[in-house]
Image (spheres, grey):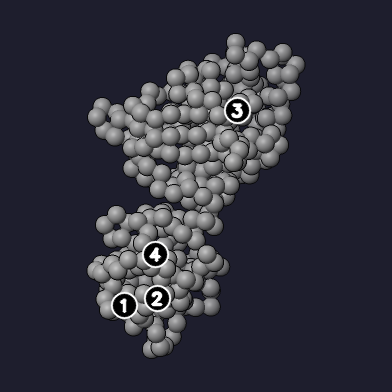
Amino acid sequence: MTTPMLQLTGLKKSYAGKRALRGVDLEVRDNEIFALLGPTGAGKSSTLLASAGLIDLDEGKVHLGGDDVTDIEPSGRDVSIVFEGFNLLPVLDVYDNIAFALRSPAYREPEDEISKRVKRTAELLQIDHLLDRDVDTLSGGEKQRVAIARTLVRRPRMFLLDEPLSALDLKLREGLRAELRQIHREHRSTMLYATHDYHGAIAIADRIGIINEGRILQAGTIEEIYARPANAFVGRLIGSPSMAFFNASIEEGQVAVCGFLQRFPLSDFAFSGNKDGKVLLGVWPEDIAMVDEGATQSNPGRIYAVDNRGYESAVQVETDAGSFRKVLEDKLHYRQGETCAFSIAEGAAFLFDPESGDLISRGHGGEE
Ligand code: ADP
Ligand code: MG
């Protein structure tokens, strides 16, 4: 194994007695874009601030390129961070805002080199026509581009991007995401990118880490996470729509779901131990097929909502054991309130512990 660019070990942080990080372990490899995905309050910003040295940790170690930087000042870490919202200097024009870090005592680049880099970065972010403008005359989207340009103009060991696009509308977001990837390709830079947006994370990242309540639940490529979601929480955060969950119980060698005609023999699961009792059955919506009512081995449901998305539609299906959402091809038409039937692909279900949410076992259907 090569040395990771960023290695976080056992990070713990409380704010006034409230625990924000409860032992964060994470590795970001050289030249990768790693997305830190989690809901608001999960600890994403704290993780990035700790990596940059901008908060004091209660416990844990930060290594950059193999060096222990836990006790090194932010200025000595050679990382560049974009905060949520804009961190622009209002008295300067766009050019000087972008050039600012390159003129700092730590860098002090020659002005012709600064000029080249500012112009190139401004072109990539499509703000080269704005270089003479005062920042307070810019729109929100333009300001965010300038804020990103300020960070990306540098060549630090790595970039820390804290929800850099979340304040922007969808179209701007998609455009800027592509530009970030382009900058990443050109400079082979390493990025840790915090977001609460699943689509944003999979669009930009090589690998993803799922964070909740100050802990990393799982890290890997999206394919690895799909093949083996470590916790029900991961299933709820990943996918489009996210994983379907049904309350189930293990009885007499099989998994039974209340109201389902389908039974799931325990021999279908890579199962060790003899757990009896309640479990949570998780299925990716892609492994659920809508079938004719009355079909053998099908399960009854009711269409709770239909959501037309133009060329496709999504249904929300309710059952006695849980509900799920699924995207349908356009030829299937369902109406709100009507009954329906569905079946789950053989070997596709996962079992989770209903208390901790931890994965107990997966079906044999996957490619493991
Ligand atoms: P995220 O970026 O994922 O939303 P944060 O790292 O900002 O998460 O916050 C994690 C937890 O720590 C949250 O509960 C948040 O309210 C709390 N928190 C963050 N910063 C502070 C602070 N400066 N003072 C008090 N509590 C904070
Ligand atoms: Mg945050």
Quadrant of the image occupied by residue 34: top right
Of the two numbered discs 3 and 4 on the same chain, state the one appearing first in sequence: 3
Residue under pointer 3: 157
CB of mark 2 within 8 Å of CB of mark 1? yes
Disc 3, SS: loop
Task: Report x, y in % for residue 152.
Answer: 61, 29
Of the two numbered discs 2 and 4 on the same chain, state the one appearing first in sequence: 2
Question: Would you place residue 73 above or below residue 368 in this image?
Answer: above
Residue under pointer 2: 267
CB of mark 1 within 8 Å of CB of mark 3? no
Disc 4, SS: strand
Of the two numbered discs 1 and 3 on the same chain, state the one appearing first in sequence: 3
Residue under pointer 4: 361
Q: Which mark is residue 253?
A: 1
Give the residue drawn at x 59%, y 41%: 1
Disc 1, SS: loop
Give the residue drawn at x 68%, y 30%: 121
Distance from disc 1 to disc 3, alpha carbons, whole Å, reads 54 Å
Of the two numbered discs 2 and 1 on the same chain, state the one appearing first in sequence: 1
Amino acid type, mark 4: Ser
Amino acid type, mark 1: Gly
Quadrant of the image occupied by residue 153: top right
